[in-house]
Image (spheres, coloured by chain):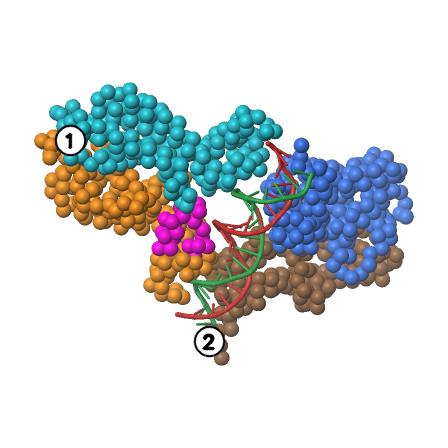
Chain colours: A blue, B brown, C cyan, D orange, E red, F green
Amino acid sequence: MPVISAQRMQDRVDAILEAAKKVFSEKGFEAASIAEIARSASVSDGLIYRYFQNKRDLLFHVLRVFYERLMLDLEREVDTSASFDRQLHTLISCHLAVFVADTALCRLFISEVRVSRDYQGSAIQALNRRYTSILVDIVAAGIATGEVRADVNSRLVRDVIYGAIEHLAWRHVNGRTGLDLAGTAEDLTRLICGGICTGPRP
Amino acid sequence: MPVISAQRMQDRVDAILEAAKKVFSEKGFEAASIAEIARSASVSDGLIYRYFQNKRDLLFHVLRVFYERLMLDLEREVDTSASFDRQLHTLISCHLAVFVADTALCRLFISEVRVSRDYQGSAIQALNRRYTSILVDIVAAGIATGEVRADVNSRLVRDVIYGAIEHLAWRHVNGRTGLDLAGTAEDLTRLICGGICTGPRP
Amino acid sequence: MPVISAQRMQDRVDAILEAAKKVFSEKGFEAASIAEIARSASVSDGLIYRYFQNKRDLLFHVLRVFYERLMLDLEREVDTSASFDRQLHTLISCHLAVFVADTALCRLFISEVRVSRDYQGSAIQALNRRYTSILVDIVAAGIATGEVRADVNSRLVRDVIYGAIEHLAWRHVNGRTGLDLAGTAEDLTRLICGGICTGPRP
Amino acid sequence: MPVISAQRMQDRVDAILEAAKKVFSEKGFEAASIAEIARSASVSDGLIYRYFQNKRDLLFHVLRVFYERLMLDLEREVDTSASFDRQLHTLISCHLAVFVADTALCRLFISEVRVSRDYQGSAIQALNRRYTSILVDIVAAGIATGEVRADVNSRLVRDVIYGAIEHLAWRHVNGRTGLDLAGTAEDLTRLICGGICTGPRP
DNA sequence: AATGAATGAGGCTTCATTCAT
DNA sequence: GATGAATGAAGCCTCATTCAT
């Protein structure tokens, strides 16, 4: 017999998560203040501590929610793609879109979460592993079908792609140049395929 | 006429900059404290404010010095290289080495500098432009000599390379896997060349 | 007519008082939290405020209940004792046993109750008076029967005994030395009797 | 080359210690606030943390200073006394006077410090040992000279005396009855001597 | 009657920055 | 020129108390 409905409670949690996502993205972890997050969520400071253990725990949850949604989208999309270069293109497109939409949050994940002591063995680490393994699996499958050269270092490919996308998104967000999502994804796919595939260059 | 010699003054400034680089790298911007930097430089807290406007200004100067040294090294090295792929390899090697040696500082540049309103039009922005343009110039020259395909998007290449290196270095620093600098530079160069060069694949 | 039976209500109150006694004893007044008391009593935070005005009021009631029980025991025991030194011994034994069993609570009474403005004229002050007067009465009776020297300051005797016991119990609880209840009671009784009685020393 | 004179610095420390003594005595440890102490010392909150590690450390220093002064007085006085009963009387007088003057602080020592984890092996524990051993030594000397019965438990005597004094002082402070220091010391000495000495009762 | 979500004041502590020395 | 004592504004977090449900 909860005092308020589960729905209302979830709404509060969602409001806090949304506000936290916003403020963390704008300010970074350290510079973000609980007070500002609370104000942004139209909630008292104290309430945040009913739902989250502390500031870092709040960040973890923001990222977890973000990551889960992202994973679902990506896995669904990639499954529908046929050939290696189409799967690669799909992944690049998805990832680029996400990074552009939430660059700051992705950065936050990279700089704040992985460093934390609680990261090892956390749900969010599992998510990260699952996420990055998607690309490694695609490359491995490409090698198996002969689409990708056998001597390719799939880890390097992974770092190149994720690194490139992170950088692209970052530049886009910080600069004032627009980014042609579709075109960039196409170009990047071609560049990578040129570097690692067997057949004639496109 | 100054009460202390210009030399002594410069020594003080250098000591502060070096200490600040160390502490900022270890702790990040927010978590670094002026007191710790001062102690590490064997200087009083107050003196820092004689040479630098505030904490962020100090960070800016640290990054500027770091960047300038890096630039000099890189430009000298690249000039001595002949063919496009050797120039590319040189740049990748240099950049990777720097990033691995000072990952935290590079990250700091990426995540902290932007927050300041003073970044636009600052000396540090100019440095950044000059730095990244080195690679764009190399690619343009490669296109001119016919070593690189004419339809290659040189900006994309730049982002792929810098992004990949950043990602590689970060993973190296945060993970426990060692990084084979020479081998990685070689692999990355080959991957990129495969993707953008004209001649037969290596 | 009450919606819940008087019995159930009393059970609730008792559960709260018992939980409060436990938590106050373990943590002290300030460090004890209403939430922990409520949890320990399997009751909601809010319910405590139906039966008690505030946290301090709750402490008062805990101490009152504790005191009342203690009084009953003591008065019953003392009545059954014959001679002065047996009465004294009984009182010392009882008091020492209670203090050792609930030292923290006794301390709490001593250190926290006074802070409140409500103490003067409160039920708990009356209890305290009644409690300490037991000993004064015993001594007075001893004087009347000639067992105690007439010039003895009964108030001083009272303070010596209660003070000694408090100190003994505290040392026992905080130190790691065991306490021989019977032996200590015997020794203390003899010491006091030696100091105030008429007959030959034991 | 300190920025301010050592004198001025000591004055600040003293002001903080004095204010802390006052507030801790009035409110107890938990209920005392750093802000109030700072205000009472006409000092900023932050300054307290330049001289003391934290709130508990501040309490420790307050008590240490208090204890040291007390020790000096007591040892000087006791040395000048000749017979056992005069030494005992001196000790009781001193201790009673101190307790009456600073009952709350003495209580604080008893309830807050001994409980603390840092107490074991601390300077303050050493002081306490030295302090309580004075009485034990006096009794032992009395036994050696034959003034005190050989079967007397000197630890019990110690607890009786300190406990009695604590209780007397407490009652005095909380009640409105005046306390005749000299008379009470005399009475208490006689009571104890009656209980433990050899010769004819006084 | 009972709940427990929500509040918001207040606590301890840190630290960038200033300024008397 | 240099120091470091001093400030005071935040920051994170806790918790007694209230009140809508």
- Find numbered disc 2 in the image and state the secondary structure of the residue it sits on: loop
Region of the chain picked out in magenta, as a range: D18-38
Q: Residues within 10 Å of mark 1 (few under 14, many from 20)?
A: some
| Quadrant hosting residue D14 | bottom left
- Find numbered disc 1 in the image and state the secondary structure of the residue it sits on: loop
Identify the residue position indicated by label 1 in the image: C149
The chain identifier of the residue carrying mark 2 reads B
Which mark is nearer the camera, 1 or 2? 1
Q: Residues within 10 Å of mark 2 (few under 14, many from 20)?
A: few
Looking at the image, can residue D91 be seen? no
Q: Are marks 1 and 2 on the same chain?
A: no
Nearest the viewer among B198 and C41 is C41
Assign the N terminus of chain A to one quadrant of the image.
top right
Nearest the viewer among D110 and A108 is D110
Identify the residue position indicated by label 2 in the image: B3
Kindly indicate whether the residue at mark 2 contacts the one at mark 1 (C-beta within 8 angstroms).
no
Name the residue: 33% across, 25% down.
Answer: C74
Looking at the image, can residue B116 be seen? yes
Name the residue: 36% across, 51% down.
Answer: D21
